[in-house]
Image (tube, helix red, strand yellow):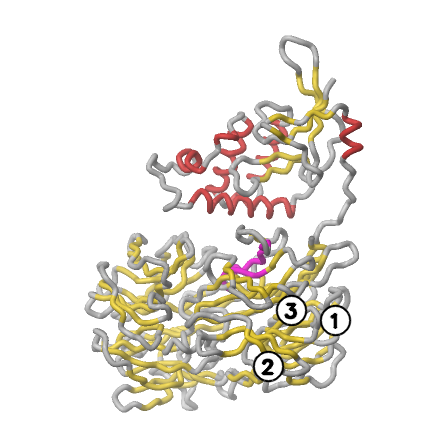
Amino acid sequence: MSTQVLRDPAFAAHPIDADVRAQLQRILSSDIFARSDRLTAFLRFIVQQTLDGHGGALKEQVLALEVYGKGVDFNSAIDPIVRVDARRLRDKLREYYASAGDDPIVISVPKGSYTPLFETNGVASGPMELPGPASGNARSEIVIAPRRRTPALIAGGSILVIAGAAVFFSVVPRLRSVPPMRILTVTSFPGAESAPSLSPDGNFVAFLWSGPASAGMADLWVKAVDGDALRQLTDTPLLNETWAAWSPDGKQIAFSRRDGARSAGIFVVSPLGGTARKVSDAFGTASDWTPDSRSLLVGDGTPAGTAIFLQDLETGVRRQLTWPPPGFNDRFPAVSPDGRTLAFVRLSAVALQAALFLAPMAGGDAARRTDWSSAIGSVTWTPDGRDVLYTHGNTSGSRAFRLAALGSEQGTPIPGIPIGVYKVSASQARVDQTFRLAFGYGQPDIGLRMIDVQRTSANGVISDVTAFVDSTRVEVPGRFSRDGTQVAFTSDRSGDPQVWVANRDGAALRRVTSFGGELLNVGSWSPDGRSIAIDAVVAGNVDVYVVSVESGGRKRLTSGPARDSQPEWSSDGRWIYYASTASGRSEIWRIPAAGGVPMQLTFEGGYEPREASDGRTIYYIDATNPNSFDTIATIKQVPAAGGREVTVFSGAAPGAWDVADAGIIFVSGDPGPPSPHGGADALNIYSVADRRVRRLGELPFTVPRVGIPRVLMSSRDGRWVLVSHVDSWERDILVADRVR
């Protein structure tokens, strides 16, 4: 009798076929796969082919033909659908087994292959019989190699034969049982608890909270992870704490502070309480410590954008570590545990696109490690320094990802961590060599309010405010149609952000797109009201598209490596203006609406183009300003055909202004406590005729400062304004315990 170790996923006929098929059915019947027909078909096909002995023939071209119905002219260099879905399938399988760790069979798809691997989840209770050749009565015993054990050697496609099951079990030791990861709820206070930072030992978490009697200003708090002990470290009713970072030696917590729209600097305070000490004037919101707890990494302004600096806390000496190109900002620094590598996020100020970069702390070029995509943030490292952890996704769908610091593979979602994650923070390694991971968690509800500007109360507060096609998810203002009767906006109410259209009164709501990429902005309507210009990300590149309102069909208008975004259709229908980085920084361009050769209009920087009512002038924001609602931006103008660039006025904020017939409507205000009658924000209009600003009315609420790229749009006649409103922003602090 001989004993075989089964490791070849293409083994043609083995006795666990029925077990694998049963496991496949369990997986496909789960909630994780029930809503994904494509991934279900993908997994069923590759498992069946492998069980039938054809695993070695599973190539990209075969899957494209058999699973997706592509033609023989399929070109994987142009259409990456198989590779993309293979990555999604691996993520879904990891997510499934995070909650089904006791299933007897594990089905996985190794990276770089489309052939699935079948493994038993633990040691087989005994040998399984495999019938011998038909010509004889001999039989073999199969011992299935357990997961995470030393892999059996495979050479030339042959399975290594080990003489005797006893020899096998003596060579491969039994794994020590490790309890699975669990999620702990640390805070569930009213309002939004945010920006958690774990103490090095993982027993306490620092976070920001405005308290039970919220006035909008957050303070720094510390709470025990495994108990109810709670301590308030700062009490500044007129100042806002915005970020926290616990030092590796556990003795200090660094945090950022803002005074309204202005940075008040970076401070440190003892976790036991006491007076906070200012250590830096840097205005970057996020900071991180070096492993020796002697220096901080801070963000601060340069002529190109926000860069990351290393600041010695004892001497105050600073050294620049990153060098962002014009139009980009470097944020969320995180130093590896050995102090040698810096991870950070580089954010495009115009396209709201971000990517994770790694750079040597000693100096040198930064290397991009993820595709350009929607917002990435809150970077941290695993205690062993092998992986980088970060968040990625839109406001309501952000997830925690894990990325190997070495290699070229993209990051994958961390199994067992829920969707809706904001900022991750890892502890140092604990006694059992696991670690804890803290994160903010919540599903924000940001709605829209339709405002009739002509109706204000006697005290100057706008009184006609109506919820517009409300949902429990995130809506972002798009644009009014030219005649003001229809509204386009983005919403993730269907699961991911798509373009929706409704009448101004909210009737006739319908979805326009079923976009497979990442939708960024809804641009303006065509003059005939039949199409909408948008910008979106496909295969990591940001381009302008024209979408049919009736059919949802789309046409790509720009191409190339530049980030082309924020389209604005001309009133005569001939041109689409947009912001592009084709020249090396964000400028205003135009391209024929039917397609053609683009033309650069500005040369001093610009984004967010808006056409004046006469069609002769383009207003835009100076691109040297960061894309942040707290920024006081400069609005400029340029002739629609190109020419002299002229400053109009300062006082509006990116994403918080629009152009009407009478002038430029914008939100202004102090993000502090509301006034006795309304919110802290007001609607204003800059009159082009007399070059003066007058107030239209005070808003009865405060507009959101974070989470969405735009908060206001106006009808062309200036009567109707759509403004973002925070319906609910509950967020709690959770901790994943026993993370490996």
Q: Residues within 10 Å of mark 3 (few under 14, many from 20)?
A: many
Q: Residue at x 38, y 65 (%)?
A: 521
Identify which amino acid the numbered label 1 is placed on: Asp
- Which residue occupies the foreground of this view, 391 or 326? 326
Question: Residue 56: image x %, image y %?
Answer: 51, 30
Residue for badge 3: 196
Identify which amino acid the numbered label 3 is placed on: Pro
- Say whether marks 3 and 1 touch (CB < 8 Å): no
Residue for badge 1: 249
Question: Residue 217: image x %, image y %?
Answer: 59, 81
Q: Say whether disc 3 or disc 1 marks the residue closer to the N-terminus.
A: 3
Q: Is residue 508 above or below residue 642?
A: above
Q: Residue at x 37, y 66 (%)?
A: 506
Q: Is residue 471 left or right of residue 534?
A: right
Q: How many marks?
A: 3
Q: Secondary structure at mark 2?
A: strand
Residue 577 is one of the magenta-drawn residues: no
Q: Residues within 10 Å of mark 2 (few under 14, many from 20)?
A: many
Q: Secondary structure at mark 3?
A: strand
The single residue placed furthest to the top in the displayed view is 135
Q: Residue at x 52, y 30 (%)?
A: 55
Question: Residue 135: image x %, image y %?
Answer: 63, 8
Image quadrant containing the N terminus: top right
- The part of the chain drawn in magenta is 390-404
- Which residue occupies the foreground of this view, 404 or 656? 404
Q: Residues within 10 Å of mark 1 (few under 14, many from 20)?
A: some
Residue 402 is one of the magenta-drawn residues: yes
Residue 257, numbered label:
2
Answer with the quarter of the image where residue 127 lies.
top right
3D distance between C-alphas at marks 2 and 1: 22 Å
Residue 633 visible in rendering: yes
